[in-house]
Amino acid sequence: MKISDKRINNRNLILILLFGNILLSLISIYIGFYSISIKEVFLTLINPLFNNNLINSAPQAVTIIFNIRLPRIFSALIIGAALAVSGAAYQGMFKNPLVSPDILGVSSGAGFGAALAISFGLPYYQVQLSAFIGGIIVVFLTDFISRRMKFNQIVNLILIGTMLNAVCTSLITLLKYIGDTNETLPAITFWLMGSLSKITKEGVIFTIIPMIVGFTIIYIMRWRINILTLGDEEAQSLGINPKLNRSIIIFGATLLSASAVCLGGIIGWIGLMIPHIGRKISGANYKTLYPITALLGSGFLLIMDNFARALLNIEIPISILTSFIGAPFFILLISKKEE
């Protein structure tokens, strides 16, 4: 599909996407196994503005809205944005449209960290912390080892990332094999499938700081990503150190990916699909692609989470739904010829 030179006004597009995410968030409050009326949701949300003296809200409704659904909705928004932005950064940095955030092993490293914590019976917040640390360590090892190889840095990163990804996947399989089949194995399997069902306010608070740092780094470096897409020689001619800037971008994107994985588990395809959709509607300039990709990722994951909660009587792991959409998208992507 050829991109038209007459693009939608990006500022208006950002406002439309922002309004759409707000509307989706409001709709998402009503979705769930516990039925809450529109009036009750509205009064419960505005009640704190009147020092909780407006109405006597049902305790169940207050607990579900403020302790479960709002943290879950907020988590879906920031996880979707984090995965989409990190995917866009990786694709631009590696100059490869088939790259996703887990190319350097962050997802498998986080998965191994979480599986290890689950195997030791640690509480959920320590599972999240272990996942975050595992993802960071694997990407650090990928970057550290690649710097000591003589090949092209991009090739080194992909090769080492693939190798460590395979090692972590094998270790996860080992933990599942030796784990208790009644408790450990189901817990690891469910976590690896990705879900927002165990989101807590404490978990959101823990991950929001590294996410803010990651978003800030990618935002500051967005114009340098534009330059890196031209190639290392062009970047050097413009006074840009490709290796240094690539490492900084990797650090920011890894913070986003690791934070997203530790909060919601492994949720695939968002970092691959959403950046492509963003480029099709706004172009490849990261100055505008950054916010548009973030908003698209937020809205997409929120929609997927709503389907996960509403389609069946039991909650469906989000990665199953994203795979149903992502796999056909990937086939279309690699088979589509530019006109």
Image (cartoon, rainbow, N blue to C red):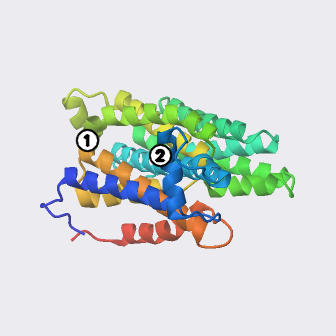
- Left or right: 8 with respect to 330? left
Residue 96 seen by the camera: no
Residue displayed at 60% across by 40% down: 201
- Left or right: 8 with respect to 298? left
- Indicate the quadrant containing the C terminus: top left, top right, bottom left or bottom right: bottom left
Badge 1 amino acid: Asn
- Left or right: 158 with respect to 115? left
N-term-proximal mark, 2 vs 1: 2
Please identify, in this view, whether the residue under mark 2 or under mark 1 is nearer the observer: 2
Badge 2 amino acid: Ile
- Left or right: 210 with respect to 194? left
Mark 2 surroundings within 10 Å by alpha-carbon count, few (fewer than 14), some (14 through 19), many (20 or more): many
Q: Say which residue label 2 marks.
A: 78
Give the camera-side residue of 23 and 105: 23
Q: Quadrant of residue 155?
A: top left
Give the camera-side residue of 29 and 136: 29
Residue 334 seen by the camera: yes
Residue at the left extreme, as displayed? 6
Q: Quadrant of residue 125?
A: top right
